[in-house]
Image: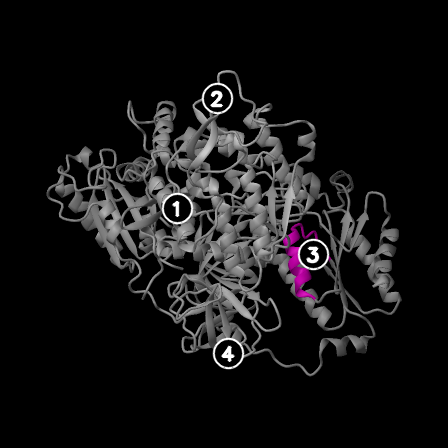
Amino acid sequence: MSSLSNLQRLESESIHILREVAASFERPVLMYSIGKDSSVLLHLAMKAFHPAKPPFPLLHVDTTWKFKEMIAFRDERVRELGLDLIVHVNEDGLRRGISPIKSGATVHTDVMKTEALKQALSLHKIDCAIGGARRDEEKSRAKERVMSFRDVNHGWNPRRQRPELWNLYNCRVNPGESVRAFPLSNWTEIDVWNYIRAESIPVVPLYFAAERPVVERDGQLIMADDERLEIKPGETVRTEKVRFRTLGCYPLTAAVRSDAADIDAVIAETRAATNSERQGRIIDFDQAASMEKKKREGYF
Amino acid sequence: MADTADSADKGLLRFLTCGSVDDGKSTLIGRLLSDAHLIHDDQVMTLKDDSKRFGTVKGGIDFALLVDGLEAEREQGITIDVAYRYFQTEKRGFIVADTPGHEQYTRNMVTGASTASLAVILVDARKGILTQTRRHTFIAHLLGIRHVLLCVNKMDLVGFAEDTFREIETGYLQFTDNLDFESVTAVPVSALNGDNVTGKSAQIPWFNGKCVLDFLETVQVDAGKDRTGARLPVQWVCRPDGDFRGFAGTVAGAILKPGDAVRIEPDGAETHIQAIENEGEKLDEAVPGQAVMVTLADHVDVARGDVIRHAESAMQTADQVQAHVVWMSENPMIPGRQYHLKLASAAARASITDLKYAININTLEHVAAKTLELNDVAVCNLSFDRRVAFDAYKDCPETGAFILIDRETNETVGAGMIDFALRRALNLTKQKLSLDKEMRAEALGQKPAVLWFTGLSGAGKSTVANIVDQKLRLAGRHTYMLDGDNVRHGLNRDLGFTDADRVENIRRIAEVAKLFVDAGMIVLVSAISPFRSDRDMARDLLQPGEFFEIHIDASLATCEARDPKGLYARARKGEIANFTGISSPYEPPAKPELRIDADTTAPEAAADLVLALLARD
């Protein structure tokens, strides 16, 4: 019997999960964060329901600190595909002047991402939020379920997770409770890139090396994406050939020096990489178990 | 999908590792990842740091910490959940389910095994085959894993002695001889030092087989499948416009092709596959595991939960099955209680009607059981509330596996593997009656109903029910009273007060009440009936609108002060076990048709509220 390749297996599994979500929940939403994993997720959702459109809207939790190119890319994709997009900003956090520069990475992420996400889920009465997180990203993610239950306060209890067997996903929740669904759970970073290449999926150009204005700060290269990034005494904005392995809020996302200007070069570089992709995420550095803490509190 | 990328051509192997903490399971995985250069530098940095803080390897890197993710596990030095690890080599992609070995984590191992096609079982060369080795092997077998790699670890501690290895290998092959594995392979290793992990060890020249990684990269696990024809459990019906009608699902069992004759289960309509599509691209075939959208040649009724299957390869359809069940919840399984069932994409209600025997997973002996506790494995008969299509798990796991979900908490409480359909219900044809329920009710000139009085002992259920009964009789209604205490003197005198017996008590009362409703009567049931799920079961037996749940809600203090039968006093003294409100829980109704505050409402007034409820209907 002919069998499926690694990527075909992963694709089928993800499509299966997306269809279970669509069939089982009343108000699902696809968390669209504009990064490469979201791009793959969106592509899979388009496939899963073709010729129909995905039967759920996209949700982008906008911290207002995303790279300009990300927002332009987002709007372009949504227009092309003819999908519904909900953009949610924590207006209260904005009024309080929360920013990644003044408030620090932890507070900013907590208020503008975690809190904002909870607001959006409650506001729109979402019973399932589909996300692009992968188990290979981080150790506490390695144990998270594909259908990951959240209590009425959006909290995650790693010690009381529902057993998840075969491909029989338990999609039942009581009112106010919800599920975070992770169709890409079993994908690795290299799978994501291989799939993007095989399927010619559009991604934000920031993933490819180009000359960009950066400052070096605490050993990390931060892109001067707009005037809000204050240049401190002794710092200079230089133009360097850089790219990003992961995308988030620009002051919190470090660039890497790279010549990988196309997908083949990015894949070659990822293969040879000696650091994991989340190293560019400044918020993850506190301590090894910090992701588990954040997730218990409702972070994606 | 275009398979241009080199790594996209590779297959994927999902395997499970099992063994106790001390066997070096996590160390083996850590070593595999590390020696295959699959660990990033920043991960090694964190690992070195963690090894100093939590590590158990003096002065060295503790590879187990790579795998043990959650904080609690790192602190306790054990693996309590299933962790999934991913790595790729030039030849294959791998998904490793790393599961704990202790008996109290059987459910985690079962979870990891459910998606694996190979089991790596570790034993300590110094200890040989232990009870736990047999347990792990049995669970792998139970979940249908057909290939085993036995890693005889810590060979360095027995001086790499061939005799020791051969003795363990021979003993293990004997043990697995009557469990139908397709392949069982043993390899001597030292995970700590890396012997025979990613390369052949110079310390073990007498071993001619493959090292662990080499074996994992080359073992064939797909051969020998194809025990059934193709099945497509329908997940989602796609109707974007009037023209297109597609059925989405993941193929199982065998290859499905356009033109294949198919039958729709469980209803039995027959047609052909018109086309198989993936994003509009027409496919020549779909292989097992592939998610597709199919269209059918004829317009037949198909909904989520149905199965499109090869016409020449029959499936079983039944509402009763025998299955192996693994219990996964701290709340015990009680025969007769209803659960949600999920089987492929089908949903139903299910209850375990007969617990035939539990299996001691250490000795494989059959033992009698009345309930199932966490981690128990048993052979059971189950009854569904509708006919469901399925295959035996050993023939097609995708259409033979199910989960059971608690109806209150929505937790996944059980996992099952179907052995076969029970034909009993089919042989027992229902006698066709010439008088039906409506005719009987009409003859009595009333609408039949069940008034179900629930509440604590001493709340006044029977008192109120008696008054209602008398008033209905005066109004010319035909009634019957089923009092919990009285029924226990006759029909239910074989039952005690354990949770299991309470469930059976209520099930029998509910069935009897249903018979009276069939006879056109108004039945008053007065029973503590402490469990919500049991009252829901009673409700489900009846037609909508026939069941009235009446909560006689008195506080425990009030009931205890009244104590008409002196039971509370005895319960407080410990003379009565499992007494509701004292040593056994009462679950109040969430949405009763009527709640009467019995602390402030006199019985006469309460009875009038019940009559008003009936009159309103």
Apparent side of residue A10 relative to residue A28 in the rendered image (left or right): left
Chain at tag 1 = A
Which mark sits nearer the N-terminus, 3 or 4? 4
Chain at tag 2 = A
The residue that mark 1 highlights is A263
Apparent side of residue B473 relative to residue A300 in the rendered image (left or right): right
The residue that mark 4 highlights is B297
Apparent side of residue B73 relative to residue B605 in the rendered image (left or right): left
**Chain part drawn in magenta:** B526-542
Q: Residues within 10 Å of mark 3 (few under 14, many from 20)?
A: some
Q: Are marks 3 and 4 on the same chain?
A: yes
Q: Is residue A147 above or below residue B469?
A: above
Q: CA distance from mark 2 to mark 4?
A: 68 Å
Query: Which callout, 1 or 3, points to the residue nearer the camera?
Result: 1
Q: Nearer the viewer, residue B235 or A158?
A: B235
The residue that mark 3 highlights is B484
Q: Residues within 10 Å of mark 1 (few under 14, many from 20)?
A: some
Q: Nearer the viewer, residue A142 or A222?
A: A222
Q: CA distance from mark 2 to mark 1?
A: 30 Å
Colour mapping used in the image: one colour
Q: CA distance from mark 1 to mark 4?
A: 42 Å
Say which mark, if any, is on residue A236.
2
Element marked by disc 4: loop
Query: Which callout, 2 or 4, points to the residue nearer the camera?
Result: 2
Q: CA distance from mark 3 to mark 4?
A: 57 Å
Q: Position of residue B339 (x, y in %)?
A: 57, 57
Three-letter amino acid code of the residue under disc 4: Ala
Query: Which callout, 3 or 2, points to the residue nearer the camera?
Result: 2
